[in-house]
Amino acid sequence: MERPPPDGDRRSGRAVPDHLRRLPRRPVVTAPLTELADVVRSKNSGPYELTIDIIFTGQDQYELVKQRRAISRELVAELYRVPVDDVGEPIFYDPAKAVKINLRRPLVSGNVGERDVYGAQQHGPLLTLRLPTP
């Protein structure tokens, strides 16, 4: 593991306090989304949008994802290979330990060439996602 130089942090140019320099750095432990959530689903949200729901198993995991914004518009856009403008801001719903994300449909629901009118099979790219664990 790389340590900052003795008198500062190369990236920011700021001095690193002695008490922080002595702390060991912990690697970030991640797990597949499929092990952290009870529900990962997509569904129709009208002719122009899809909704993706992720309902986490544990409160600690949900809070960590929410606090770190581990699920973001940029991440979803990258997973789905769409422009960031096609992804809505994730909505965190505390009572259900859930995250909701809206996506613009690539084709209008029911249009020629559109293969999933109900939007029920569009959560696949999320299944490859790994998230930090508490």
Image (spheres, helix red, strand yellow):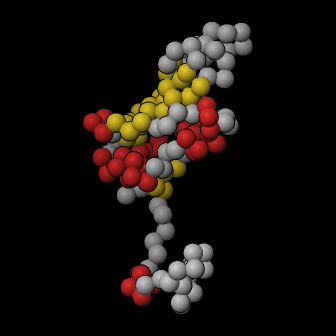
Q: Where is residue 91 shown, x and y percent of the image?
A: 42, 36
The residue drawn where x is 60% and y is 13% is 109
Is residue 32 at all visible to an observer of this figure?
A: no
> Image quadrant of residue 19?
bottom left
Which of 47/25 is in front? 47
Quadrant into which the N terminus falls: bottom right
- Residue farthest toward the bottom in the current orientation of the protein: 6
> Image quadrant of residue 55?
top left
Q: Where is residue 46 shown, x and y percent of the image?
A: 52, 15
Quadrant into which the C terminus falls: bottom left
Height in image: 51 above or below 76? Answer: above
Q: Where is residue 131 shown, x and y percent of the image?
A: 48, 51
The residue drawn where x is 49% and y is 26% is 51
- Residue farthest toward the right in the current orientation of the protein: 113
Which of 107/123 is in front? 107
The residue drawn where x is 54% and y is 85% is 8
Height in image: 43 above or below 85? Answer: above
Left-right relation of 67 to 81: left
Is residue 62 at all visible to an observer of this figure?
A: yes
Q: Where is residue 92 shown, x and y percent of the image?
A: 38, 39
- Residue farthest toward the left in the current orientation of the protein: 95
Height in image: 122 above or below 112? Answer: below
The tally of labels here is 0
> Image quadrant of residue 119?
top right
The residue drawn where x is 59% and y is 44% is 74
Which of 111/13 is in front? 13
